[in-house]
Image (cartoon, grey):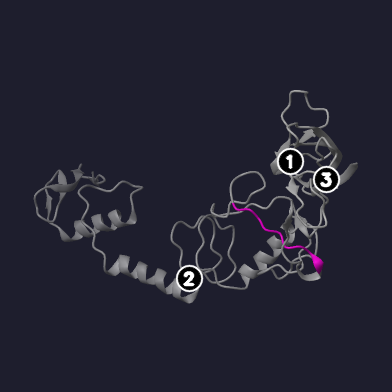
Amino acid sequence: MMQYATLEDTLYFWFAVNDTAGAGADGSAPAFDVRQGGAADSAAPTLSGTPTLLTHANYPAGAYEIAVAATTGNGFAAGSSYGVFCNATVSAVNPTGFVGGFKLSPVSANVVQYLGTASPAAHTAGYPVVTVKDGTGTGEINTNAGAIALVDLVTTATTVTNLTNAPTAGDLTATMKTSIGAAVAASAVASVTGAVGSVAGAVGSVAGNVVGSVGSLAAQAKADVNAEVVDGLATDTYAEPSSVPAATSSLKDKIGYLFAKMRNKRTTTATADVVRNDGDSAAIGTATLSDDATTFTKTKDV
């Protein structure tokens, strides 16, 4: 008897045991072995087991049933053929019997079972619920990595949370950029880390450098800038220069030298005009004086 089944099915076979007189007898030590067709002659059986003795009163003595669980876990494979042999000890002998064979086909895809395990209930509109395995192996998604990369996202999206212009099918990339940009423009952003190409609207505060141009300053920003300028002119103090500022020195040093020259002690002889420092402990600058009875000349301070 040849049976045709699907991988993961359980197949049943039956045989009877008779004693040497021809009468039915239960015997002892019944067993069965399942061989894969085409395997080496020395290959071990794919599955071995003990048949079940049928004990109902309607069955005669020696009636046995064999159950073969043709699962991948038991070593069975789709597309292969198998033969089932049996034996039992009766009347001091151990005859061998062949009860049949079977061929397995692959498991068909369906939404009812997966490898013999019931699938979750169907989702809305009949689509099955899919359980994603968390991990780092092939076909797994690592949800502990802080970010999940979605590649070739082309599945129909009927509802996309927090996107106001999501498509119903196809690549979301362009529309997501547009939608996210619109959402950011229309709402407040708590903080931004990294470079910002441009900002349209009010910015509460910036920690770091602003590279580029600023279109205009609001009233508060202008007031803050004005306060800093006034503070630099009216509050901050600056030490007097210790030497004559260069022609390209800062305005602070130039003004400081003019103030020192007007305020501090100066000593003038026929040949030199000297500007002393505030403590009168050193000269800040000196100009050479000369007079040839026609022209009085004073050089620049050095």
Instruction: Indicate left or right for 204 with 160 as reference.
Output: left
**Residues at marks 3 and 2, CA–CA distance in whole angstroms:** 81 Å
Residue at point 82%, 35% (across, down): 20
Disc 3 on helix, strand or loop?
Answer: strand
Q: Residue 23, position in %: x, y? A: 84, 42
Q: Quadrant of residue 91?
A: top right
Q: Which residues are magenta?
A: 126-134
Whether residue 106 is visible: no
Q: Are marks 2 and 1 in contact (CB under 8 Å)?
A: no
Disc 2 on helix, strand or loop?
Answer: loop
Q: Residue 197, position in %: x, y? A: 59, 57
Whether residue 174 is visible: yes
Residue projecting furthest to the bottom: 219
Q: Which residue is the site of mark 3?
A: 13
Q: Which residue is the site of mark 1?
A: 27
Residue at point 66%, 56% (across, down): 132
User: Mark 3 or 2, which is nearer the eye?
Assistant: 3
Q: Residue 148, position in %: x, y? A: 61, 54
**3 or 2: tag closer to the N-terminus:** 3
**Residues at marks 3 and 1, CA–CA distance in whole angstroms:** 18 Å
**2 or 1: tag closer to the N-terminus:** 1
User: Mark 3 or 1, which is nearer the eye?
Assistant: 1
Callout 2 amino acid: Gly
Position of the N terminus, as image quadrant, is top right
Disc number placed over residue 204 in the picture, else none: 2
